[in-house]
Image (tube, coloured by chain):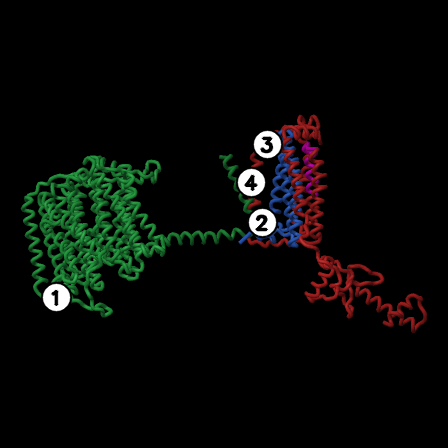
Chain colours: A blue, B green, C red
Amino acid sequence: MNPVNYLYLAAVLFTIGAAGVLIRRNAIVVFMCVELMLNACNLAFVTFSRLHGNLDGQIIAFFTMVVAAAEVVIGLAIIVSVFRTRHSASVDDASLLKL
Amino acid sequence: MENLIGLLVAAPLLGAAVLLCGGRRLDRVDHWIGTLLAAVSFALGAVLFADLLGKDAGARTLTSHLFSWVPVGGFRADVAFRLDQLSMTFVLLITGVGTLIHLYSVGYMEHDERRRRFFGYLNLFLAAMLLLVLADNYLLLYVGWEGVGLASYLLIGFWQHKPSAATAAKKAFLVNRVGDMGLSIAIMLMFTTFGTFAFGPVLTHATDAGEGKLTAIGLMLLLAACGKSAQVPLQSWLGDAMEGPTPVSALIHAATMVTAGVYLITRSGAIFNAAPDAQTAVVTVGAVTLLFGAIVGCAKDDIKKALAGSTMSQIGYMILAAGLGPVGYVFAIMHLVTHGFFKAGLFLGAGSVMHGMNDEVDMRRYGGLRTYMPVTFVTFGLGYLAIIGFPGLSGFFSKDKIIEAAFAKGGTEGWILGGAALLGAAITAYYMTRVMILTFFGEKRWQPDADGNRPHPHESPRTMTIPMVVLAVGSVFAGGLFSINDTFLKWLEPVTGHAEGNSPLSAIEVTAATMVVLVLGVALAWAQYGRGPVPVTAPRGNALVRAARRDLLQDDFNHVVLVRGGEELTRGLVRADHSVVDGIVNGTAAAVGGLSSRMRRLQNGYARSYAVSMFGGAAVLIAATLLMRAV
Amino acid sequence: MSALAAAGTTSIGEAVQFWLLATVAVLGALATVLMKKAVHSALSLAGTMIVLAVFYLANGAYFLGIVQIVVYTGAIMMLFLFVVMLVGVTAADSLKETIRGQRLLAGLCVLGFGILLIAGIANAALKDFDGLGQANSGGNVQGLAALVFTKYVFAFEITGALLITAAVGAMVLTHRERAQRPAGQRERAEARIREGKHVPPLPAPGVYARHNAVDIPGLLPDGTPSELTVNPTLRARGQIRDVSGEALQELAALEQRSAEWVTGGRGEDGRSASGAKEARK
């Protein structure tokens, strides 16, 4: 088996995640889909690391995880405060930014 | 001595400032303040004149640099004065005649409520005119020029409660603006041509510039002169300007304002000398105006308007002479000075008559006044003899020279110009005789005024008669004094230059011809008005008379061509503005608005829609990158 | 596994593992997107992440594999679950699309994007690979540490700053400052009277010998339950236990028995006493 298969898998996961972001209305699920996309990227980085025979890819994946963790913290905080004020976790309800 | 030049202008300016700002506490002494400051100015002028006389003929130019007005890069305008023989002549005329008119106004305006303001304006008029003739560059001259325009506007419309006066003031101001545009354009042309507009460099280097440019400058200067000096085609304001108080008319017609145009052309002689086409235009304007004014003067029954026509005609003589070049400059100025005396005298006399006749102006209602107003009759009569060129009096010397110079132009042109000048002299004799007979001779045709008061003609007070006497003396002797030994010619020659013309007719022949036409004119007027009774209401007259009564249709012409034309043009522009300009603007706005209302549907506020756009964009970018790599 | 990852080839075992677990991962991802309840999505995602952790390990990223399990599946997903619970664990989303054309556009974009990615990977020349043998020779964690603290030290420091900022940000966002004193008993009573809907306090939930609980609605005089007596949260979740029918039945049975006892002889003492009491009611 060629490790390139991991890359195909990463592409598929990324695409599924993207579809979820675009289709789901629940902010939490949307957020999970973003996490899925990030994970797909991480898989691709790890695979590249193996293909190229150095650890730089893993380092990048590591940083991605850290940034994803920070993002999750902030994102969930936003969701919680939005839910508190609007009693809804739907991304479509927060549509004030229009004419 | 140079420092006195500034004071010369400052004195009347100070008077204007004090009188216009001083308020009611000056009400008892205002007329004397105004007169005193005008007299101070005259005294300073006299001192300076004595100083100039003491110098050599070539060194009679004083300059006084007060301060740098606008120093910007290569552009430099100074407030500097230049006193040479030409400006000296004007200074003496302006301040001298001006002071006499001030004195006359003391009596004439004694009971006017707004007398303080009147004297303030008179002083302002003097100051502006002095600034005009003393300026050392065209820009400062322009300041004086505009000041004269302003002061004339204020004075013509002084009785602003009369709508006709307010309209006349506006008319004078507007017509003058046309001339002012000419002067400002001329100054701009000078700056682009010579890089400066100081008299010295411009006039000494005038011949270096191309003739085309000089002609353009000359024509623009002529336009300016036409505006201020009421020459055809900008003459229409002068007749209406009679709405102002009579001393104002005297001031405008004799000492200030209308002489500005002659001064400008004479001062810019170097430019005109090098631009023969412009000179031709000048003499044409002068010749046309001298006939035009004379014809108008014949038909008017209003004494002041008849005199106004006469002024127009006499200024036409001066412009004609100035347009003849070095042959005529000196005589133009000489006629200007003598005219200043007798025209001021005539106007003051007219004012005196009106004063005695309950402000009646129609000459057909005068008659037989010589016994009631002896001083006025004598002074007016001397002015009359002077203006028609009675031998030995001022007008004889100056006008004769101009006619001679016109013939000296040479060729057909010379004959035409000389003929026009001679014809003008005949008409002058006619209409002045008519004024004289209608006013002072014949039976009494006095009519009660609107309130039913019958006039009780009486001699005017001392303050009014003294100036008239002084001016009458001037009208009698000035011409002779100037001509003895060619004094005036020698005095002015260093500034204007002089050339003897070779006239096809000898001086004697010209004088004889002038005498003949003079007698003809007087005789015709006598035959028409002196022999029988004069109807109180004017007969209908033939077409020419009717046209002349309407100022030879000049207002109708202006109305049809300028006003109607302007209105049509404006209407067209408004239509174009509505359809084309607004159409483009509104169309653009509508297009943008329509596009926007479609675009705004993209802004639905849903984060997911935006996310789709972003994602699609990212996909397109990646596709483009891959394509680029593939290619 | 580690030896294989180090080599420049892959084994059959890894292939089998890949195909099995990849299927699980894709199914988990699809479930994440398609499940109606957020909590199901979260659990599916956790599953996918664990599978990914295994793949990391298979690719020689031992440290990352462990971190994936500990940090992602352990911490982040728990955070998600926590928030899901906070927002409402049983609330199911409707999957019906409300924005016109959104699903079509999203489908097109996703399809195009996927095709692009896969075509790009397929076009890339990735036949041979080096393996991590050399890079991991000093140990994977040591190798990563060497890179983090030398080559990527600035990025590392900046990441630290980012984390601190994120922590502060989360606190700022979720902290609720009380702008005014909370309404006390008096204010609430006044507001209630001003509203005029429930002037007295809300009725208490039902109290019974066997069921003294907040999820039991009180009974109205006609014997029907009053939902008003139950906490709105429980009402919203549909977690009300209606025991009124049961109680009525028991009462009816009791009456019958007591009637039998009166007519047919003595029963148990306790029951008769209580039954007599009920009958008197």
- Badge 2 amino acid: Ala
Which SS class for mark 1?
A: loop
- Label of residue C126 in the image: 3
Disc number lying in front (3 or 2): 2
Tell me the crowding category of disc 1: few under 14, some 14 to 19, or many 20 or more residues within 10 angstroms, Cα based: some
Which SS class for mark 4?
A: helix
Q: Which residues are magenta?
A: C46-62
| Chain of the residue where label 4 is placed in the rendered structure | C
Tell me the crowding category of disc 2: few under 14, some 14 to 19, or many 20 or more residues within 10 angstroms, Cα based: some
Across and down, in percent, residue B134 comes to: 26, 42
Which residue is rendered at x = 94% and y = 71% of the image?
C265
Asked if one can make out residue B281 in the rendered structure from this viewpoint, the answer is no
Tell me the crowding category of disc 4: few under 14, some 14 to 19, or many 20 or more residues within 10 angstroms, Cα based: some
Q: Are labels 3 and 2 assigned to the same chain?
A: no
Across and down, in percent, residue B590 comes to: 42, 54
- Label of residue B443 in the image: 1
Q: CA distance from mark 3 to mark 1?
A: 133 Å
Q: Are labels 3 and 1 assigned to the same chain?
A: no
Disc nearer the start of the sequence (4/3): 4
Residue annotated with mark 4: C116
